[in-house]
């Protein structure tokens, strides 16, 4: 199993919806709202690098 920590920036007005949408993506196991230049940290788990690439480039 491959685990990636993905840092995400988003449009300010859409943050709550984006957080919910991120959490609904298969392979995303955790989503954290954070402060600073980054808006979210997502933990993504996949069996293969190709699957991981598909998830993080959505």
Image (cartoon, rainbow, N blue to C red):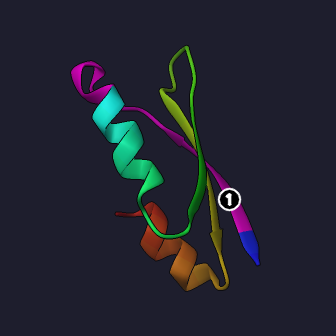
Q: Residue 55 at what x, y percent from top left? A: 46, 68
Residue under label 1, please give it.
Answer: 4
Q: Residue 2 at what x, y percent from top left? A: 73, 73
Q: Is residue 25 left or right of residue 58?
A: right
Q: Residue at x 51, y 34 (%)?
A: 40
Pick the quarter of the image with the N terminus. bottom right
| Magenta region | 3-15
- Asked whether residue 12 is drawn in magenta, I would say yes
Name, please, the residue furthest toward the right.
1
Pick the quarter of the image with the C terminus. bottom left
Please name whichever residue, 38 or 29, is drawn nearer the observer in this view of the structure.
Answer: 29
Vertical placement of 58 versus 1: above or below?
above
Q: Residue at x 55, y 69 (%)?
A: 27
- Asked whether residue 10 is drawn in magenta, I would say yes
Q: Is residue 46 left or right of residue 20?
A: right
Q: Residue 25 at what x, y percent from top left? A: 42, 62
Please name whichever residue, 53 or 26, is drawn nearer the observer in this view of the structure.
Answer: 26
Q: Quadrant of residue 15?
A: top left
Q: Residue 30 at what x, y percent from top left? A: 62, 49
Q: Residue at x 34, y 49 (%)?
A: 21
Q: Residue at x 42, y 50 (%)?
A: 22
């Amino acid at each position: 199993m491959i685990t990636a920590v993905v840092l995400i920036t988003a449009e300010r007005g859409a943050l709550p919806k984006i957080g919910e949408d991120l959490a609904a993506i298969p392979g995303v196991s955790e989503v954290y709202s954070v402060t600073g230049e980054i808006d979210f940290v997502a933990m993504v788990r996949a069996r293969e690098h190709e699957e991981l690439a598909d998830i993080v480039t959505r």
